[in-house]
Amino acid sequence: MSVETVTKTAPRNVVDHLDATAYHGNPYPVEEPMREPLVLGNPSLHDVTAKIAGIIEGKPNLKYWVAVLICASIAGAGFGAIGETVMTGIGVWGSNNTIGWAWDITNFVFWIGIGHAGTLISAILYLFRQKWRTAINRSAEAMTIFAVLCAGIFPVIHTGRPWLAYWLTPYPNQMQMWVNFRSPLVWDVFAVSTYLTVSALFWFMGLVPDLATVRNFVKGKIAKRIYTFFSLGWTGSMRNWHHYEVAYMILAGLSTPLVLSVHTIVSMDFATSVLPGWHTTIFPPYFVAGAIFSGFAMVMTLLVIAREILGLKEFITLKHLENMNKIILATGMMVGYAYSMEFFIAWYSGNEYERTVFINRAFGEYWWAYWSMVSCNVLSPQVYWFKKARRNIPLMFVISIFVNIGMWFERFTIISTSLHHDFLPSSWSYYTPTIVEIGIFVGTIGLFLTLFLLFSKYLPVIAISEIKGVMPGSQPTHHGDEHH
Amino acid sequence: MSEKKTVAVLGNFTDPNKIMEAAAKVHQSGYTDFDIYTPYPVHGLDKAMGVKRTILPYISFGGGMFGLSNAIFLIWWTGSVDYKLNIGGKPLFAFQFSIPVMFELTVLLTGLATFFGLWFLCGLPKWYSDLQDDEGFQRAVDDTFVLSIFSSDKRFSLETTERFMNEIGADNVRRIEA
């Protein structure tokens, strides 16, 4: 147990040199002192700086570089597969006339979904005043950006001529043509690029004060220059913090409907078509819940490893992991509800095509994909009804992997089962991925992990200023507006 | 060689309650050109300092309206004026199919306006500060609250300001010359 043991006692003052009388006789001035502390071990403010900036200042060991090399090689192989696709054409994929969308769109939706947890943590939990988010928001936001980058690769290469992908944007051109705003695919271009831009702005804005902290902490001349440049000369001026906090609130308020809109629009790629199995009104909420579900699973996978390797157990405590497991359970139940409701509506609608598609989905040629999805997404998180399971690290790691797999299968099931049996039985077909497609998907996993590894070494993995602000004793016990 | 001039008097605090009281006192004494450097936003400190409410929301709102109106104009003009294309008998322009792009462009432009508006209001990027060589000031992004009263303030006078800083409980009161 040791570090994992969370004491139920109220935390003592975090800043040791503080005058205890300043708390007007109340040694535990911060709200909700009886809750589990957000930071363990009562570090001082400087300890927090030293711990998190210390990761950047310290020299990475050989294992780190081996890990980077492996992930980067996988990413490189993926780019090789992309090269093969671009040079030869998308005929090197297993997609065929019947199944025109397969792994590429599955992977696109999968990665976009992964990103949603980051925005949920950074924006929605912020608006709900969930202070525990401060330990995990930075890494989750980083994950969002990297996941959206991976997602963007797929539609771009699926165009077949990725160098012309800019045709997807409306711009005056010599062909005198404009994009078709009645197409959900154009909505997607706007949704995904807005999502990437706003997430990156929000992330960078959050980083600036911490980069200033790192700037003053690192010793190396070049490192100091780089961090100085990117910290924009942040001084910690309260007059700046005043604007900053309002900006943070606005961006959080913007990101909240944005994150809901992105997967809603992604789901409309399917829902606005007239294919049985796709043409349903449940898709937007179902996709959003699934996205948050899969994103939290990915955050869990990464954080369980990161807190171990980077030694962040004081900051990313069992309480944080348990809270995330609760969200995984809740969103897992939501997707479970959506799966059953889809079946109910397929029967209740009386539409025989709809009914056939769903029977085929569960018991047809792709039964294995469907039942992998159900067992990973609906059954496996059920263990989280028990507190013991929610706080069991090896178990939560395994479940998070299950959920990642299950959510990938969800997208694959939706896409291929609705396509492979179309309205004309003579054109029914079956889809098997080729080695090139597998290579591209595995390559994006390598790219994602490479970026995350670099992030965890060169940027503050925990929002230093935010975590300082929620530590016990860091906020005044009375407020300035008492003075007239 | 130009002569060095005192630009500010600095004092340190480590207790959030004390810096709060000090901020209120500085504000009440009529100083306006002062600042407090903190490692994290201290709740209510801006109010105690008498900082005026930021105009950033108006900038954001302006950006949002710009994005929204541009989206409407873009979709309407390209679809029903410049390039009329009948697709499945759908109308050339309707709000129903325009909503997703209108929403996204509103959010995008609001986000950009907020981001750039923030740095504009903060006067950043600015990679040089008169205070940057002061060791205490450097710790303001780590674990210290630093109160700084600038010599450009009308009420500033070296001795009285220094005495005042000591009275309100600042540690290590010092002059910064530049």
Image (cartoon, coloured by chain):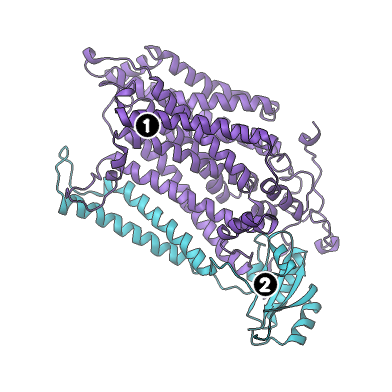
Chain colours: A purple, B cyan
Q: Is residue A456 left or right of residue A254?
A: right
Q: Is residue A337 left or right of residue B21?
A: left
Placement of the N terminus of chain A among the 4 image quadrants: top right
Q: Subunit of mark 1?
A: A
Query: What's the residue at 55%, 51% (across, down)?
Result: A127
What residue would you read off at disc 1?
A83
Residue A470 place in picture, x, y as percent: 69, 52
Residue A234 place in picture, x, y as percent: 60, 63
Between A467 and A124, the one lying in front of the other is: A467
Instruction: State the CA–CA distance, disc 2 to disc 1.
Output: 53 Å
Q: Disc 1 residue type?
A: Gly
What residue would you read off at disc 2?
B131
Q: Picture quarter containing residue B140?
A: bottom right
Q: Disc 2 residue type?
A: Leu
Placement of the C terminus of chain A among the 4 image quadrants: bottom right
Residue A330: tell me if it is visible: no
Whether residue A257 is situated above or below residue A484 in the rendered picture: above
Residue B89 place in picture, x, y as percent: 15, 39
Q: Picture quarter containing residue A155?
A: top left
Are the residues flagged by discs 2 and 1 in contact, CB closer than 8 Å?
no
Query: What's the residue at 42%, 13% (across, down)?
Result: A367
Q: Subunit of mark 2?
A: B
Q: Residues within 10 Å of mark 2 (few under 14, many from 20)?
A: many
